[in-house]
Image (spheres, helix red, strand yellow):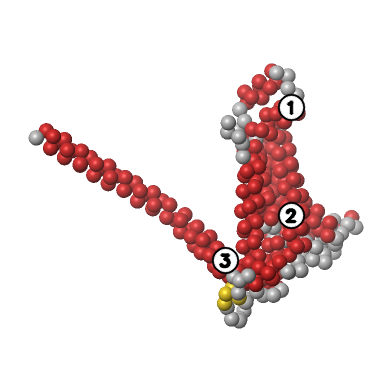
Amino acid sequence: MTLFVTTGRARRLTRTVSSSSRRRAVKGWLYAAPTTIFVVVLFLIPLILVVRMSVSRWPLLSGNQGFNAPDNYTKVIHNRFFADSIVFTLKYTVLATVLLIGLGLGLALLVQESSRWKNLLRASFLVPSALGLASASLLFYVLYSPLAGPLRGLGVSFLGTPNAALYSTTFLIVWRFAGFYMLLMLVGLQGIPGDVYEAARVDGASRWQTFRRITLPLLRPTLALTTILCVTGSLLAFEQFYILTKGGPDNSTITVVQLIYIVAFQGQNDLGVAAALSVIVLVALVLINILQLRAFRTDER
């Protein structure tokens, strides 16, 4: 009799545990449902549609649609702006990444060590980050204007030559995002234990030795995050060049994303070719991010 009672209790306990596990699983799925729906509707479905468009005839206004792979990808490669847009985008990405990461780290070190003006400096550097990129681009468009801009008296053509347009636009991006990267770097710096710096000072390490031997190695995860964000954002640059330069002068500042817009809505009016270029950009971004993660991956041993 005791054996049957014990077995019955064990079965009831098992059923109770199973029911509780199912309830927790259902709650988990319910909590994850909004995010899942968001990802499916705004990422997976558009991604599938773009891939389908990239292997199909898909004119913007009218025309027959149908499978035509790999014609769209061939047209992308033979586009007269394709190679130049890649070179310019990579050039801009390297320049913007170096300046933003370097300046962001420098500003973070400045506001970390400053005591009297720390809060004022942090707020001052973060103010441009509150302004939208399109609004900031319009602001600098007026600033650079040779007709009505406040800098017209200098006699400098800020957007008149390819190099001037590149550097002027990069200055806008550095002004707009330096405070944001400063904040990320500051969070990483504050996560470094103070005992490590104290031990370095006791051992007689100089400021440069402390920075090179302690700060940079322990800041590696933050550097990885900021570099990935900066490189990805620079490779997808569009608003600043569309507003400031319109791809000029002489089509010298056309980025890859701007080329997608031109192919889809201004040039060929061909969404299929634009989708093929979008797929190429997506694959390139994934590969570049994988390489960056491997480059910054630390040896846990």
Cα distance in 3D space between marks 2 and 3: 24 Å
Q: Is residue 73 above or below residue 288?
A: below
| Residue plotted at (72% across, 35% down) | 110
Q: Residues within 10 Å of mark 3 (few under 14, many from 20)?
A: some
Helix, strand or loop at disc 3?
Answer: helix
Q: Is residue 235 above or below residue 291?
A: below
Which residue is labeled 1 in the image? Answer: 209
Which residue is labeled 2 in the image? Answer: 90
The amino acid pointed to by label 2 is Leu
Residue 213 appears in which quarter of the rendering?
top right
- Which x, y percent locates residue 162? 83, 60
| Residue plotted at (77% across, 54% down) | 91
Closest to the observer, 216 or 272: 272
- Which x, y percent locates residue 217? 66, 33
The amino acid pointed to by label 3 is Val
| Residue plotted at (64% across, 54% down) | 285
Depth-wise, is mark 1 or mark 3 nearer the camera? Answer: 3
- Which x, y percent locates residue 20? 29, 44
Q: Is residue 246 visible?
A: no
Residue 196 appears in which quarter of the rendering?
top right
Residue 136 falls left or right of residue 16: right
| Residue plotted at (53% across, 65% down) | 48
The amino acid pointed to by label 1 is Gln
Q: Earlier in the sequence, mark 1 or mark 2?
A: 2
Q: Is residue 4 visible?
A: yes
Which residue is labeled 3 in the image? Answer: 51
